Image (cartoon, rainbow, N blue to C red):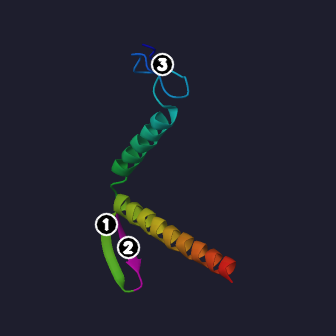
Amino acid sequence: MNVEHSKFDHNDDTQVASGRKGPNTTLIILGVVILLFVVFFLQNSNELRLNFLFFERTTTVRWSLLVAVALGIAIDRVGTMWWHRRKARKTDV
């Protein structure tokens, strides 16, 4: 009976597909970035008064930053969708 084994079939759980051992570097960097963001978010607890057109509110810096980031992501997504649709429409003509 002939059984073929892949080079990754052994019991070493730290072996990754690229042949390296150890944790994923990208995952570690992502964890550090998330940790830094959480620290930054928690440290910005100063209150501020926000006035925009007819909108007035007293809030903290952290929530203002979070709303600004969320709006920036939303605007980016809408702009990207518009750009791709425009590009696809040009290629159809």
Determine the image quadrant of residue 80.
bottom right
Going 41% across and 47% down the picture, which residue do you hit? Answer: 37
Look at discs 1 and 3 and give the one toward the viewer. Answer: 3
Q: Which mark is residue 50?
A: 2
Magenta stretch encompasses residue 44: no
Residue 45 in picture, x, y percent from top left: 33, 55
Above or below for 50 versus 73? below
What residue sits right under mark 1 in the picture? Answer: 59
Q: Main secondary structure of the magenta part?
A: strand
Separation (CA) of disc 1 from disc 3:
64 Å
Mark 1 touches mark 2? (CB < 8 Å): yes
Q: Crowding near pointer 2: few (<14 within 10 Å), some, many (20+)?
A: few
Q: Amino acid at mark 3?
A: Glu
Residue 8 horizontal/vertical position (percent): 48, 22
Q: Which residues are magenta?
A: 47-53
The N terminus appears in which quarter of the rendering? top left
- Compared with 65, 38 (above or below) is above
Three-letter amino acid code at the position of disc 1: Thr
Q: Residue furthest top?
A: 1
For disc 3, the marked residue is: 4
User: What residue is at 36 percent from the left and 58 percent from the top?
Assistant: 62
Residue 32 in the image, given as x and y percentages of width and height: 44, 38
* Residue occupying image coordinates x 43% and y 16%: 10
